[in-house]
Image: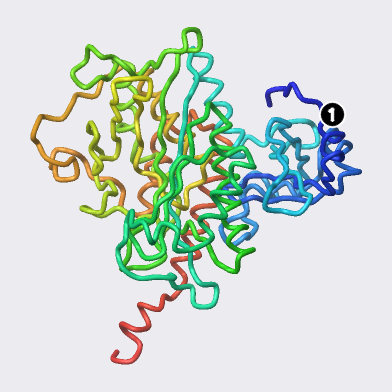
Amino acid sequence: MAKSTKTITDLVRAWKADNVAHVQFELPDMHGVSRSKLVPISHVESYATKGLNMYGGTVVLDSASSVVGNTLYNEEVNYADQYLKPDLDTAIIVPWLDRTGRLICEGYWEDGTPQKAAPRWVLRQLINKAEDLGFDVKLGLEYEFYVLSPDTSEPYFGGLHIFNTLRNRYIPLIDQIMDEMPKAGIDLITANSEYAPSQFEINFAPSLGIKAADQAFTFKNGVKTIAHQMGQNATFMTKPFSDTAASGCHVHIGLIDKKTGENIFLDNDDSDGLSSTARKFIQGMMDHSPASMALLAPTINCYTRFKPHTFAPSNVSWGPQDRSAAVRAKNSRDDNTHLENRLGTGLSNPYLAIAAVLATGLLGLEKGTEAKTPKANSGPAEENPNYKTLPTTVEESLGELEKDKAFAGLLGEEFIKAYTTMRWNEVARFRSHITDWEKQEYLEIY
């Protein structure tokens, strides 16, 4: 982990002056959920220095928090502890909690070896690789989520009211989120109602490198906490209802020259305003999109999102300003020119979603093949029969991940082993479950 310019002694002193009483040492797990221990302020410096012990398999718990064997993190190490080491640059006073500080951590084994399957560690290695190539990675994520009644698990209003001014602020939770997030260092830029009952989208300004993922992690977990405090349930579940729109997480990415500060994706002499580097990056995202979906659409539920004419991609495609494509080129012909990967779902882990997009793009730069612009007037990308279809199940995408040696190699052998084992276990649990649909369809008549 990069060494912060802050010191834990100075940080604790400042927190005490601000009346902070306790600090959450938070570990992002495979799902992007925060796993933490709450530490009294009097013990923070000691634990931050030596590491805070926590069960070593925490990061690979499955979606039901079940312990999964054969992940390298459980029986193989006798269920040993890990030690959480905080990144001091992630220190905040959590505005929606009482007298509480927060530190995002990574796990290390007792001998100092990092947990290389941890999502934040995986992403940092890829960002370091980009920086070694001379790039800063500029990132922004946009999230959609539902706000539901905790009593009925149903929306607070019906109808399709995207951008409707009344619905934008119909639920006071949205105002509360807009007020609280900037206090946590998250620069919100827009909020609006979305294309489903009680569904919203909130976007925040782009950041460089790991900070973007840390902010997304803070945002998702913060939204759920604030909603709970207000007696509501905010869910990033990709598709909670069969007859309404799904929630996505689009990943916006650009590369900045570390020496000059120039946007490497911009070329105003190109017909689409895109540089050769941008086109290579696009081709990499397309070449490896089937495998990347195992991270961008990580659960069984996610695959209900990918249907034609829903503004969710259904094939391996790209296009300038094409909302139906898997990759949308946002060629504004200025420093804001960037690429938008539209495969991400609400249930994706921000660290792994960014890792997937960055890894595929870096592979594209390495290969050097430039994506060609779709023919003019050829219609939306989703209607182009020349594009290959995307995986339609999580089993298919996991199979693609295991086959794509180049993509898997960038993520790391330890991560692939832990991640795929955990996800296959989740699939097996689901396949052994009898659904309500099956009972309604077959139980009485047959």
Q: Position of residue 386 (x, y in %)?
A: 14, 38
**Relative to the observer, which residue lies in front, 106 or 72?**
106
Find residue 107 and report its image quarter: top right
Question: Which corner quadrant of the image does residue 371 belong to?
Answer: top left
Q: Is residue 80 visible?
A: no
Q: Quadrant of the N terminus?
A: top right
Tell me if residue 423 comes above or below residue 141 in the rendering: below
Q: Nearer the viewer, residue 120 or 260?
A: 260
Q: Identify the residue at horizontal 52%, vertical 30% (top origin).
A: 207
Q: Which residue sits furthest front?
A: 166
Helix, strand or loop at mark 1: helix
Asked if residue 363 lies left or right of residue 68, the reply is left
Colour scheme of the picture? rainbow
Residue extending furthest toward the bottom: 444
Pick the residue in front: 174 or 318: 174
Q: Is residue 369 above or below residue 282?
A: above
Q: Is residue 74 left or right of residue 194?
A: right
Q: Residue at x 86, y 48 (%)?
A: 40
- Relative image position of residue 272 (x, y in whole percent): 21, 22
Q: Is residue 83 above or below residue 9?
A: below
Rendered location of residue 97, percent (x, y):
72, 53
Q: Using residue 370 as the reference point, say whether residue 222 is left or right of it.
A: right
* Residue receiving disc 1: 10
Q: Residue at x 41, y 75 (%)?
A: 435
Q: Residue furthest left?
A: 377
3 or 83, nearer to the observer: 3
Picture coordinates of residue 432 (x, y %)? Answer: 46, 70
Specify the farthest residue to the top. 259
Q: Is residue 239 above or below residue 53?
A: below
